[in-house]
């Protein structure tokens, strides 16, 4: 790794390593488009990612439904089936013989299934449109070029709206009995889904780490994000941000929390600082501090706390970094 001890100083050398999964995420083009946007610590981008990822999860859930009847909540299933059965049978359902009841129930299910499949198809389309539109709106408004979703092609049976294949057409017998041999036997639809690396980047709070790393860079630090640093004890520590500035021999580490900071977080960072030879530490949090004790302890350990990260301007946060 490129971080070095300043010449003539007695601090231990940094021996650091990144996990391969971290390197994979960093090298994804989608994640790069987020990193270069310079907007990771803004509430707008945070809300955009939260909402498009949740719609993308819905698309994923809908795509995995094999039999839409068995995925219906019990009450909804009961209501829908009885409604169709009532329309179909000449007498009241309770007057049907056992045999007729079974037959009408089967017919009602057969009628319901394609209706539910069409519903699913519509839901996928609506969620997918939402994802594309929200990202496009965001890019336009903020002059950014986020490329954070993938498009896949869905092939549906024209007869019963069953999803036949995703991304690659293959001949198949549909469960409704139709033999599908040509693309023209199907109805094509596209589905936008958030890139999986972006999802990990968001859910594992990596957006916060890289957003904070940029703040250090802007203050002329040399930085690394998400590395394992070998301490003088021989123990390897996972550290969110390592930052070094040779001009005034400052070496510091920063940790990020997407929740309220606890006393234990201070002890933990303080321990890492001691073992890696860092005199200063920072904790960045999206939460609000509840206890003065956390502050007292942090001050005594040379740790600065920067809370409510998403509510502060870049300038306000930069001013808090030495
Ligand atoms: Zn079919």
Image: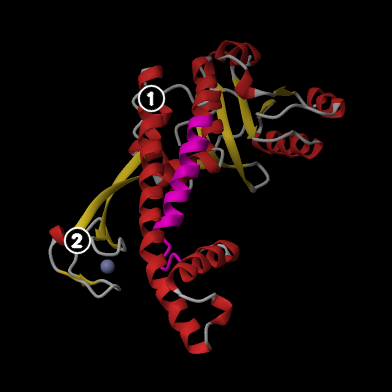
Q: Is residue 282 visible?
A: yes
Q: Earlier in the sequence, mark 2 or mark 1?
A: 1
How packed mark 1 is, by other alpha carbons closer than 10 Å (few <14, some 14-19, many 20 or more), is: few
Q: In percent of the image, x 38 and y 68: which residue is there?
A: 111
* Observer-nearest of 17 and 104: 104
Predominant SS along the magenta part? helix
Q: Secondary structure at mark 2?
A: loop
Q: Position of residue 163 (x, y in %)?
A: 31, 61
Residue 250 covered by magenta stretch: no
Measured Cα–Cα span from mark 2 to mark 1: 32 Å
Quadrant in which the N terminus is drawn: top left
What are the residue bounds of the magenta stretch?
47-69
92 and 25: which is toward the camera: 92
**Percent of width and height locating residue 72:** 52, 63
Which residue is outermost to the front?
Answer: 91
On the image, numbered disc 2 is attached to which residue?
169
Horizontal placement of 162 versus 169: left or right? right
Q: Of 239 and 82, which appears nearest the observer?
A: 82
Question: How packed is label 2: few (under 14 Cα within 10 Å), some, or many (20 or more)?
Answer: some
> Residue at coordinates 52% horizontally, 68% vertically from top-left?
82
The image position of residue 171, as x and y in percent, is: 17, 69
**Residue in the picture at 43% in, 41% down:** 198
Q: Position of residue 186 (x, y in %)?
A: 20, 59
Q: Quadrant of ligand 1?
A: bottom left
Q: Which residue is mark 1?
A: 137
């Amino acid at each position: 790794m490129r971080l070095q001890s300043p010449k003539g100083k007695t601090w231990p050398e940094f021996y650091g390593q990144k996990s391969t999964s971290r390197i994979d995420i960093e090298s994804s083009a989608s994640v790069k488009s987020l990193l270069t946007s310079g907007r990771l610590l803004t509430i707008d981008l945070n809300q955009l990612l939260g909402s498009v990822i949740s719609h993308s999860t819905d698309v994923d859930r809908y795509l995995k439904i094999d039999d839409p009847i068995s995925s219906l909540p019990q009450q909804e299933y009961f209501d829908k089936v009885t409604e169709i059965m009532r329309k179909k049978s000449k007498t009241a359902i309770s007057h049907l013989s056992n045999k007729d009841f079974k037959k009408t129930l089967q017919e009602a299910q057969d009628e319901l299934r394609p209706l539910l499949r069409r519903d699913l198809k519509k839901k996928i389309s609506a969620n997918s449109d939402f994802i594309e539109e929200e990202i496009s709106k965001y890019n336009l408004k903020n002059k950014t070029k986020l490329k954070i979703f993938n498009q896949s092609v869905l092939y549906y049976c024209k007869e019963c709206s069953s999803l036949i294949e995703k991304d690659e057409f293959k001949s198949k017998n549909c469960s409704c009995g139709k033999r599908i041999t040509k693309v023209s036997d199907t109805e094509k639809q596209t589905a936008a889904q958030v890139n999986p690396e972006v999802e990990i980047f968001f859910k594992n709070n990596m957006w916060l780490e890289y957003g904070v790393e940029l703040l250090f860079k802007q203050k002329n630090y040399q930085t690394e994000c998400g590395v394992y640093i070998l301490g003088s004890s021989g123990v390897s520590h996972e550290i969110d941000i390592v930052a070094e500035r040779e001009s005034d021999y400052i070496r510091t580490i920063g940790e990020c929390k997407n929740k309220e900071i606890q006393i234990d977080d201070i002890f933990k960072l303080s321990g890492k600082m001691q073992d890696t030879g860092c005199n200063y530490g920072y904790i960045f949090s999206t939460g609000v501090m509840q206890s003065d004790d956390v502050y007292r302890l942090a001050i005594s350990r040379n740790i600065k706390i920067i809370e409510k990260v998403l509510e502060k301007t870049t300038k306000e946060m930069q001013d808090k970094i030495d």
